[in-house]
Amino acid sequence: MNSQAETRTVNNYSYGGARALIALHEQHMRSFLKTWTRARKAGVTLPRTTDPAYKSMETLLRHPLKSSRGYIIWICQKLELPDPEIDPVPGLKHIEQSAEQFLEHLLKQWQLPLRDVPEERFFDRTYTSNWDVKYCIESMLEHAVMHLIRHEFQLINLINDTTR
């Protein structure tokens, strides 16, 4: 994947760290979707677990999309920015057919909310997440990126196990 060619992040951010994390988020969202598609085609079977995100391949596809939507909405709420107006994530029945289109919408809506936020707002305080962990805005952006990397890593391992 040529990530630079596929990443279309707006360049004029007040804080370059935000621009970088939004570009990385986009890159890893696209990569996750490609890896999920590879896993589906390879016939990957998810391990038994109590993690609801791993209930099915459809839930595993929907989970990062829903989480990504939630992260940017949470960030905008904490910074008292306008709602980024991201559509609800498609339901499980339609997620596979709608994922690519929804992803384009999601990534587009991630582009602008943080563009004019001054650097100090990314670090000046912490906020409690929906899962009761404290994050500054930058650390939530980092979490959003790493969340995708972790799920893709797991899928790659499952693909490798399936194709051995």
Image: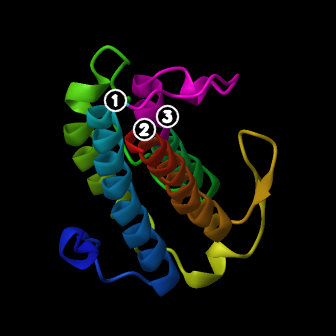
Q: Nearer the viewer, mark 2 or mark 3?
A: 2
Q: Which mark is residue 162?
A: 2
Residue matched to label 3: 63
Quadrant for the N terminus in the image: bottom left
Q: Is residue 161 magenta?
A: no
Relative horizontal placement of residue 136, taking residue 152 as reference (left or right) = right
List x then y, in percent, for residue 4: 25, 78
List x then y, in percent, for residue 60: 47, 32
Badge 2 marks a residue whose secondary structure is: helix
Q: Is residue 51 magenta?
A: yes
Could you tell me which residue is drawn at 31 percent across and 36 percent down? 42
List x then y, in percent, for residue 140: 63, 60
Q: How far apart are labels 1 and 3 at the CA level?
A: 19 Å
Badge 1 marks a residue whose secondary structure is: loop
Quadrant for the C terminus in the image: top left
Segment colored magenta: 44-66
Q: How far apart are labels 2 and 1 at the CA level?
A: 7 Å
Relative horizontal placement of residue 28, taking residue 101 as reference (left or right) = right
Identify which amino acid the numbered label 3 is placed on.
His
Identify which amino acid the numbered label 1 is placed on.
Gly
Residue matched to label 1: 43
Q: Nearer the viewer, mark 1 or mark 3?
A: 1
First along the sequence among labels 2 and 1? 1
Residue 91 visible here: yes
List x then y, in percent, for residue 92: 38, 18
First along the sequence among labels 2 and 3? 3
Badge 3 marks a residue whose secondary structure is: helix
Q: How far apart are labels 2 and 3 at the CA level?
A: 22 Å
In the foreground, 34 or 8: 34
Residue contact between numbered discs 2 and 1, judged by CB atoms under 8 Å: yes
